[in-house]
Image (tube, rainbow, N blue to C red):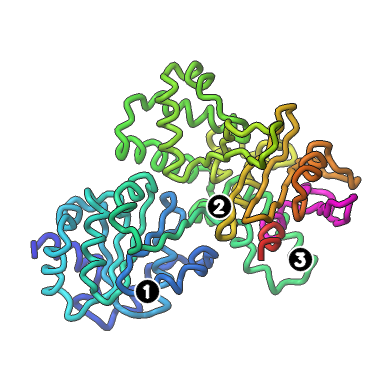
Amino acid sequence: MDRDIQGILERDNPWLSDPGRVRDWLQSRLPDPYIPREAAERSESRWREKDRAHLVVGPRQAGKSTAIWRHLADAGEPALFVDCEQYLVREWCRSAPLFLGDLDGLVDHPVTLFFEEAQHLEEAGLFLKGLVDRKLGVPILVTGSSSFHLRAQTRESLAGRATRTRLLPFTLSEVLQDLSGKPDAIRSRLAEERFSRHVTIGGYPSVWLSETPETLLTDLVEAMLLRDASDLFRIARPDAFRRLLRLAASQAGNRINLSEWSSILGVSRDTVASYLEILESGHIVSVLPPFAGGKRSEVTSTPKLFFVDNGIRNRLVHDFKPLDVRVDKGAALENWVFTELWKSLPDGASLHFWRSSSGAEVDFVLVRGDVVVAVEVKAERLRRKTLPRAARSFAEAYSPKRLFLVNTGLSSRERIGEIEVEWVHPVDIAERARSIFN
């Protein structure tokens, strides 16, 4: 083994020279406080499966590595951490047989392998396939920030050999976990306060736990969106990419108009489309397709765009004011509801919006099998239990199992004709919508 690579591995894995330090080393990699992640808890049993690659994808600094460190700390067993951002490590990880041959001289028996930021490997898919196919008898844990690169490299190579977990910034329910034992009145007040903070600064762990979240969001935009994108994708027009970010933030919740955006930015329509694909693959934005229920009067071609994290969007529009005093409070709340629904989608479910050719629109439609749930978002504090005309039209046409009206003032449920309607506070929408599918 190359001495420099061995030095890197020994520094990153101090237990190699002192096996008695394993538990302390694993615990030292965890933040204090540690906030449990729902996606990780759903995947942990899979992460214990041997002779498979377990991919954990999501944006930088969303907590992917921390979730894996928590999993390893719970097991309390040795694991070899491999940092794929290191140049020498990338060169080393070109050949699975050579990698394993070197490893035989470093560890006495096979241990769990943990590859950090594997998208930096030149042939990540083939390398991981080589490890899986050699039946090492251990799990292979892998993180990746760019789903575009990792998906392209692993789709064919790891077919049937891998699991995939998407880990995104904190959901509201994750940052409310510690309130479960508090009196109802205290819990309600704190939940409202944290909801307001979550809408404003988003859920990136370092941002959420910081006393200077706006500064960290600025750093995130520069490091994660711009430098990473430039390094990974060799963007030819970084000035246009920056302006697209700001334009997309101002248009969050609106339908995408590539021709209009290309005119504003002074680049081709195809360039705008490719930049949006980069942002989507990096888990920065998400393109929401329209609901196609088979009616002739539907708009079924033009998707909408939302940001995966409200804090990033608010940084790009330079507005960190509380929701109730924002000029764009409708767009800000709608984007936040999107993030909560998207992060909490049950397995096999998809998320859409609905729009008729006459302009009637329902903000979100969740679908799994033949179960349909509609969600309409109102930024104001509703006082009366009224049903918007567009929501009624959708309900009459598609008979959703539940129609939610998200608002900050009214909580109630009743049946209006054949439609079961629930007025719900934003704090509760993700849990309530997900419960319909359970």
Q: Please tell me which of labels 1 and 3 falls first in the chain.
A: 1
Of pointers 2 and 1, the one earlier in the residue sequence? 1
Q: Which residue is mark 1?
A: 49
In the rendered view, would you say 209 is above or below 25?
A: above
What is the magenta range? 404-431
Q: Quadrant of the C terminus?
A: bottom right
User: Which corner quadrant of the image does residue 420 belong to?
Assistant: bottom right
Q: CA distance from mark 1 to mark 3?
A: 42 Å
Q: Residue furthest left?
A: 2
Q: CA distance from mark 2 to mark 3?
A: 22 Å
Quick one: SS at disc 1? loop
Residue 299 occupies quadrant: top right
Horizontal arrangement in the rendering, residue 239 relative to residue 263 (left or right): left
Q: Quadrant of the N terminus?
A: bottom left
* Horizontal and vertical percent position of residue 351: 61, 47
* Cα–Cα gap, marks 2 and 1: 30 Å
- Picture coordinates of residue 435 (x, y %)? 69, 63
What residue did someone put label 2 on? 203
Q: Which residue is mark 3?
A: 186
Q: Are marks 2 and 1 in contact (CB under 8 Å)?
A: no
Q: Relative to the observer, which residue lies in front, 362 or 245? A: 362
